[in-house]
Every structure is written in C-alpha cells, then in structure tokens.
Image (cartoon, grey):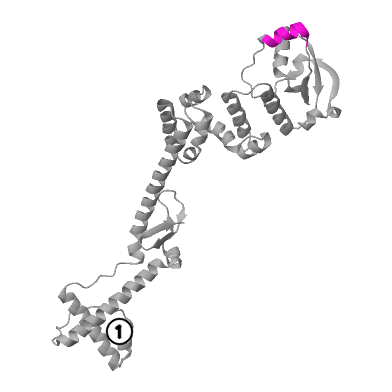
C-alpha cells in the first residue's frame, strides 16, 4: 500500500470532528467487537491515528473503523486522523488488506465483499488481480449467493466449506439445479471435498456421454437424407430385373444414340424396368457379375462420401439439440465426433 506508507501524502496532526467521519463502503466487516478495545482506550488513550480520505464534505475511513466506533461509544467529539489522497482502487485494497492483517474475515464477510465489488461491475478475474486473491476462491464466494438461503446459511456456518463450493464450479456454470442437489448431498452425507470432486467428475462423464448420444441420434436422423442407403438386389427377380436393365443400357451404348431423345435418355439415371427373363444362363451369370461390381463401386463411393470431412462439413452442419449451437458432425468408420 504505497500511498499510505509515503508520509508526504499525509496531512499530519489533524484533528477533526468525529461526526464528519463516515464508514468505508468497501468495509468487509459485518461484526465489530469493541468491548476490549474500549477498555484499552480508556486505560491507555488512542495509540494510533485513524486513516481517512477526503470525500466531499466528509472523511471516509481507510483504517480504524473499530477504533472509530469505540470512540463514538465513549463520547469523543474530535479524533486525530491522518488524511491520505488515494483513489477508489487503493482505498478498496487498503481497507481489505489492513482489516485482514488484524483478523481474518468470516466466510460471509469475505463473500459479501467480493459480491459488492462484482455488483459494482468488477469481474471475478479483476477482483482476483486487484486483491491478489486466487480467482477460483473469489468465484466460489460469489457463487455462494446463487444457492438458496438454507444452503447459504450452511456455507456461512461452515457446514459446507468454500472449498466445496469451488469444487462445484463447473456444475454451477452449467446447471444450477444440479448444483443445488449436489450441495444438499454434501450437507446430508457430510461429504469431504475430495469425495465431492470425485462425484462431480463422475457426473460430468455421464453428462458428456448423454450429450454424445443425443448428437449421434441427431446425426443418424440426417445421414439418410445426405447419403441414403443403396438397396441391394436380393430376390432372384430383383437380380434379373437389374441385370436386364444393365444389358439394355449396354446395348444402347454399343448401338449409339440415333436421336436427340435417345441421347437424353442415356443421360438419365438407370431405372429398373420389368423385362423378359434371360434365357441364356451364361449371359445371365456374366450380367450378375457386372451388377455386383456396380454395387460394390457404389458402396465404395458411399463410404468415400461418408469419410469426406469437406462433404460432411457442408452437409451435416446443424444446431446441437443439447447446447443449441451450430455443430459439425464428422464420421470415421462407426464413430462420430462433433465440433
């Protein structure tokens, strides 16, 4: 706290009316025990000046609130002070650090202080950096206010530690109802922090598995429209019809298209039409072989499309049913993954 240590910024030896002094808005203390302090002041006098800063027509306490309250109860009209010129940032830091040095804060006091700074627009990271306090510790204190009052009360009375709340950080960020249930489980089963972390990890894995299942189901719904299944001829009649259609096409190609209409027909997809059965067994088997080769080629083409990331990136972009954000589905063999 350089601004307080540098005596050149102090106005020494000032004595001001005690009613002109106001409590700091950044004071974390909720409870002030003045009984012993009043006895000491009555016996030895005030051994150190109060530290204040000028705020309009009044003076705002930086250090010495417990002494100021004791002096008011003792009936002092004026009090010696040191006036320092500090901005809000230094005032916040000074009040927090000086009080903490003398006596650690209760859980509720520190939580209320962090919440006040958060309500004023500071992020947990900014609070952490300014006060030199661990980020997750700050966030846990702020998160405590997201729970119902009975859970908050359990936290303030240390039935649930702030380390427990920190362990629930990921759950609080995703599902507050689940976090409340977890907090009640901690309370009822008297879980340790290590046990809580283990439960959180297990439930996180379950949640990820459910999300993956939901995404795969979404993929399976749209895959048939993008890469539809190619029906395989199985019955003898189906094989004969497909073979005859291929033979007709081959014959047309050999003879060549004699009319524009015929050229257009050649450009059309193969359509299986019912035709007379092939009588020659040798030709029939040759045709079946060619048909199987054609089916294998189509199957390979289908697999190639399914393995093509570029194809899937274009075709399978959709909103995830769990997070409602745009996702891209990729496939490798029988496995899918999401980005």
Specify whether 250 is left or right of 49: left
The relative height of residue 35 versus residue 49 in the rendered view (above or below) is above
Residue 87 in which image quadrant: top right
Q: Is residue 73 visible?
A: no
Residue 238 in which image quadrant: bottom left
Q: How many marks?
A: 1
Residue at (40, 67) in percent of width and height = 307
Specify whether 110 is left or right of 336: right
The reply to whether the magenta stretch includes residue 41 is: yes
Residue 50 in which image quadrant: top right
Residue 316 lies, in percent from the top left, at 41, 61
Residue at (46, 52) in percent of width and height = 325
Residue 126 lies, in percent from the top left, at 65, 39
Instruction: Return the residue nearer the eye: 324 or 220.
Output: 220
The residue where tag 1 is placed is: 265
Q: Main secondary structure of the magenta part?
A: helix
Specify whether 101 is left or right of 330: right
Residue 78 lies, in percent from the top left, at 79, 12
The reply to whether the magenta stretch includes residue 264 is: no
What range is drawn magenta here? 36-45
Instruction: Return the residue nearer the eye: 243 or 183.
Output: 183
Residue 14 lies, in percent from the top left, at 84, 18
The relative height of residue 264 versus residue 38 in the rendered view (above or below) is below
Specify whether 290 is left or right of 330: left
Residue at (57, 37) in percent of width and height = 136
Check disc 1: other Cα within 10 Å, few if <14, some if 14-19, many if 20+.
some
Q: Is residue 337 visible?
A: yes
Which quadrant: the N terminus?
Answer: top right
Instruction: Return the residue nearer the eye: 232 or 276.
Output: 232
For the residue labelled by badge 1, is the local secondary structure a helix, a strand or a loop? helix
């Amino acid at each position: 706290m350089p601004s307080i240590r540098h005596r050149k910024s102090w106005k020494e030896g000032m004595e001001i009316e005690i009613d002109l002094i106001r409590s700091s808005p950044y004071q974390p203390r909720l409870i002030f025990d003045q009984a012993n302090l009043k006895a000491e002041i009555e016996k030895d006098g005030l051994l150190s000046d109060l530290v204040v800063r000028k705020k309009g027509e009044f003076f705002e306490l930086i250090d010495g609130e417990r002494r100021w309250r004791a002096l008011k109860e003792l009936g002092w009209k004026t009090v010696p002070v040191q006036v320092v010129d500090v901005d809000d940032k230094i005032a916040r830091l000074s009040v927090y650090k000086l009080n903490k040095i003398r006596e650690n804060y209760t859980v509720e006091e520190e939580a209320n202080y962090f919440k006040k700074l958060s309500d004023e627009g500071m992020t947990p990271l900014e609070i952490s950096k300014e006060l030199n306090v661990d980020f997750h510790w700050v966030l846990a204190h702020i998160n405590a206010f997201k729970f119902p009052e009975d859970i908050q009360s359990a936290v303030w009375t240390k039935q649930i530690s702030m380390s427990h709340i920190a362990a629930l950080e990921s759950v609080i960020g995703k599902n507050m109802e689940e976090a409340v249930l977890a907090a009640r489980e901690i309370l009822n089963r008297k879980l340790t922090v290590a046990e809580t972390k283990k439960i959180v990890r297990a439930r996180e894995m379950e949640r990820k598995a459910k999300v993956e299942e939901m995404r795969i189901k979404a993929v399976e719904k749209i895959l048939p429209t993008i890469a539809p299944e190619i029906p395989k001829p199985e019955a003898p009649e189906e094989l004969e019809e497909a073979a005859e259609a291929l033979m007709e096409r081959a014959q047309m190609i050999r003879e060549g298209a004699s009319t524009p209409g015929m050229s257009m027909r050649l450009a059309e997809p193969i359509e299986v039409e019912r035709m007379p059965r092939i009588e020659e067994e040798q030709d029939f088997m040759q045709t079946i072989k060619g048909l199987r080769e054609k089916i294998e080629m189509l199957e390979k083409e289908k697999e190639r499309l399914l393995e093509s990331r570029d194809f899937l990136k274009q075709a399978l972009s959709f909103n995830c049913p769990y997070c409602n954000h745009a996702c891209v589905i990729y496939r490798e063999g029988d496995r899918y993954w999401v980005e």
